[in-house]
Amino acid sequence: MDSTLLPPPAVIRAASTSKGRKQPIRSRVRHGSPSCADYGCMRPECIAAARRDRVRRTRELKAGRPARVPSAEAATHACQLQKTGLSAADIAEISGVAVTLVRRLLRPASKQPARIHRATSEAILGIPLTSVFRRDRLLPGLLGAERAAASLQDLAERGWPTSFLAAELDTSTHTLAAIRSRECRRITLDLDRKIQRLAALLFTSQPADHGIAAHRSRRARTAALQRAPLVRPRDSDTARQPDEVS
């Protein structure tokens, strides 16, 4: 390698001995941002960005606008956004806030961060509650698959074959089996909605009403009851038993 392309040794030593924090492997911090200098980067543009940010925060603190504010208001708004159909990934994409922080705000109050940056709070509070209805594409966000897994297990115990469910949901039997067995921990918001809508529809009917043969229904029910102790949460003391079918 050409030595002329390498930075001077003094710069390398300064970077290695700086008091900056260790940058996470999956960090999205880019050169030219204040956080990059906090991680020990010695590039002029990163140092200048950190200096400008420090001056801005000092000026706002003197004006009575602290850099950190209580997170309660932003967390409440994030929960309201989630109820309208936005996932944590959707909120993060719209606001520009890291999805990890959004997920922390969506936790129960006792597990939420006490204070967050004011810019983060303003970014989340700036999302209108009607954002989900103005998006032209399917929601790409991910969420926990626990509710979908429980619905699929309940349907199986009622005698609904996985192949029938996969055809109705326009997905594969392998995908549904992975969700039901809780091997797949997160699914798309769109698939979760499809599963919940289908479950609400099928809970009010019987497999025979949809042309499913009795032997297929019995086989699906038997397999579901055999795997129930393995896939149902251990803390569920009263697991629902399916109705007997003569």
Image (cartoon, helix red, strand yellow):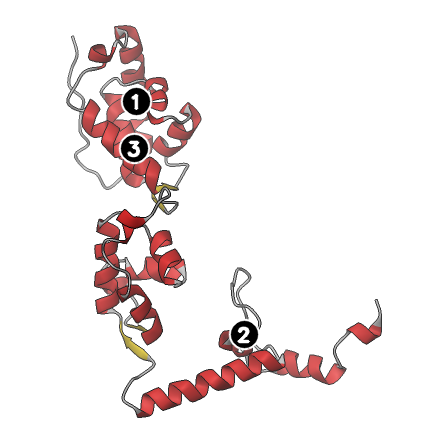
Residue 130 visible in the picture: yes
Tell whether label 2 touches label 3 (CB within 8 Å): no
Disc 1, disc 3: CB below 8 Å?
no
First of labels 3, 2 by sequence position: 2
The residue shown at (77%, 74%) is: 6
Tell me which amino acid carries mark 1: Ala
Res 147 quadrant in image: top left
Q: Which mark is residue 47?
A: none
Q: Earlier in the sequence, mark 1 or mark 2?
A: 2
Amino acid type of the residue that numbered disc 2 sits on in the rendered structure: Cys
Is residue 42 left or right of 165 when viewed as pictured?
right
Q: Which residue is mark 1?
A: 224
The residue pinned by badge 3 equals 194
Q: Residue 54 placed where, x, y %?
A: 45, 86
Which mark, by number, is residue 36?
A: 2
Task: Indicate the quadrant where residue 177 lies.
Answer: top left
Residue 132 is situated, as x and y percent measured from the top left of the image, at: 28, 49
Q: CA distance from mark 1 to mark 2?
A: 52 Å
Which residue is found at the position 59% from the left and 79% from the top?
45
